[in-house]
Image (cartoon, rainbow, N blue to C red):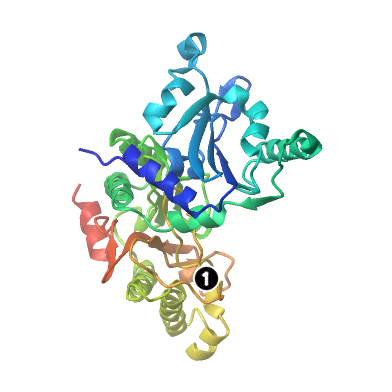
């Protein structure tokens, strides 16, 4: 049976938020609306990650209200009402009457009444918690409601005297994944790993970058993940040196490498894998040398993925490998220690080592503690580790290295005694890649 986040877990998350809210506080979190793509067609709907985290509800135009006034915690969901005519065209709706049972909230109301009801919900609260900057329409509605309450204080209304950001509370919760979240993320990683193994078999000279993308999306969808977690990157040759290359329109040439960065989104949770492999199934000498540096750098970083260690230490370990090896190859000139001290390796390793992973591919969560020191890893955190070397055609180094771009990325869960690599099934060493690609 495929893993699913149970409704009880969403209820427990809301209860945790309520327990952390001061008395006489109201928190409001809105879902996304559909976005027009062209004329009367919309982009595929994707729910707001914060709203999804608290409700698991995947319909547009909904708002969650968590209220803690006079010691009475309660939850209220506004959503679209049932509408047989609209449902014939666009699909069934839950309807606010069904929200109490289906979503385990205390009350459901029609979303059309939200703007009129905000004042009532905020009356008597001392503060309002929203996701600042997330939904300008909601923030305007909250401010209008506060203005109304202030203007009518003689009638006995009590207006909140401050609006605060809910992010810090939710981000801290989302940074640690539950047992069931990890099960869902393992499934996203498994589906994504299968897709990468598929494209390695498919890849050949003359294929198009967009054909690799199509093969990935086909495998995602066939295994229950209808959409990628982000724009897929399939960069052949020098395109691999463009970090967020998503055009995916060029032909794959014999003798080039192709860098593919992709991940399935499964039940809202992202996977994020990068592999770099030869179009023809065989690494050249130069490609193999650069590739093995990146692989060595990743292994050096892996040694620091454990409780009590830091992403900063892992980054420095990977950077030291890249710096020293590029100096040995004279891609970096001069002394290795001096190059490292002066960050000259950043010319070729031009991004961070990794990021948190979860409902967003670049998931929320702090990287530094409140005292400014690097945050230490703890069990339940999930992150990517993705060192890379990018030698553009304009880099000015020896011609033999130009146009080589390599990144290797895996998805790791921090455990009690180290880490679990959720994406280790994808061939990664040169021997594994060549063997897998040639045995078609």
Q: Quadrant of the N terminus?
A: top left
Residue at image coords 36%, 48% = 205
Residue at image coords 50%, 13% = 83
* Nearer to the camera, 144 or 225: 144
Residue at image coords 42%, 28% = 100
Among all residues in the image, which is located at the extreme top? 85
Residue occupied by mark 1: 368
Q: Is residue 382 above or below residue 246?
A: below
* Nearer to the camera, 138 or 233: 138
How many numbered discs sit on the rendered protein? Answer: 1
Q: Is residue 401 above or below residue 412?
A: below
Q: Secondary structure at mark 1?
A: loop
Name the side, left or right, on which 303 lies relative to 243. Answer: left
Q: Position of residue 380 (x, y in %)?
A: 34, 61
* Nearer to the camera, 297 or 35: 35
Tell me the quarter of the picture where residue 149 sits.
Answer: top right
Q: Position of residue 3 (x, y in %)?
A: 26, 42
Q: Position of residue 245 (x, y in %)?
A: 52, 51
Q: Position of residue 164 (x, y in %)?
A: 64, 52
For the question of whether residue 417 can be seen, the reply is yes
């Amino acid at each position: 049976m495929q893993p699913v986040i149970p409704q009880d877990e969403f209820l427990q998350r809301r209860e945790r938020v309520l327990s952390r809210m001061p008395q006489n506080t109201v928190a409001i979190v809105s879902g996304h609306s559909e976005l027009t793509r062209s004329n009367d067609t919309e982009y595929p709907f994707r729910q707001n990650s914060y709203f999804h985290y608290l409700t698991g509800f995947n319909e547009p135009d909904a708002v969650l209200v968590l209220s803690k006034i006079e010691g009475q915690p309660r939850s209220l969901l506004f959503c679209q009402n049932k509408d047989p005519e609209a449902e014939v065209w666009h699909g069934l709706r839950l309807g606010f009457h069904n929200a109490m049972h289906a979503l385990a909230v205390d009350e459901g109301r029609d979303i059309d009444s939200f703007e009129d009801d905000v004042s009532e919900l905020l009356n008597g609260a001392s503060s309002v918690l929203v996701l600042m900057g997330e939904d300008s329409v909601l923030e305007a509605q909250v401010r209008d409601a506060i203005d109304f309450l202030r203007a009518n204080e003689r009638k006995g209304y009590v207006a909140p005297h401050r609006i605060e950001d809910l992010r810090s509370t939710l981000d801290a919760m989302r940074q640690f994944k539950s047992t069931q979240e990890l099960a869902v993320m393992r499934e996203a990683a498994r589906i994504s790993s299968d897709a990468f193994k598929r494209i390695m078999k498919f890849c050949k000279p003359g294929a198009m970058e967009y054909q690799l993308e199509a093969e990935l999306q086909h495998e995602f969808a066939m295994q229950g993940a209808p959409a990628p977690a982000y724009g897929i990157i399939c960069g052949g040759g020098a395109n691999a040196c463009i970090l967020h290359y998503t055009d995916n329109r060029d032909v794959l040439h014999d003798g080039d490498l192709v860098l593919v960065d992709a991940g399935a989104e499964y039940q809202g949770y992202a996977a994020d894998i990068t592999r770099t492999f030869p179009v023809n199934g065989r690494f050249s000498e130069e490609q193999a040398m650069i590739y093995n540096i990146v692989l060595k750098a990743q292994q050096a970083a892996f040694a620091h993925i454990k409780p009590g260690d830091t992403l900063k230490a892992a980054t420095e370990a990977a950077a030291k490998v890249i710096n020293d090896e590029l100096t040995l190859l004279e891609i970096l000139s001069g002394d290795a220690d001096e190059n490292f001290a002066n960050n000259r390796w950043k010319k070729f390793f031009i991004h961070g080592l990794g990021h948190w992973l979860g409902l967003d591919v670049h998931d929320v969560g702090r990287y530094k503690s409140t005292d400014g020191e690097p945050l230490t890893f703890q069990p339940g955190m999930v992150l990517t580790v993705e060192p890379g070397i990018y030698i553009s055609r304009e880099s000015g180094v020896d011609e033999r290295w130009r146009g080589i771009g390599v990144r290797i990325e895996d998805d790791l869960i921090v455990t009690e005694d180290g880490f679990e690599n959720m994406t280790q099934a994808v061939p990664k060493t040169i021997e594994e890649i060549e063997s897998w690609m040639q045995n078609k």
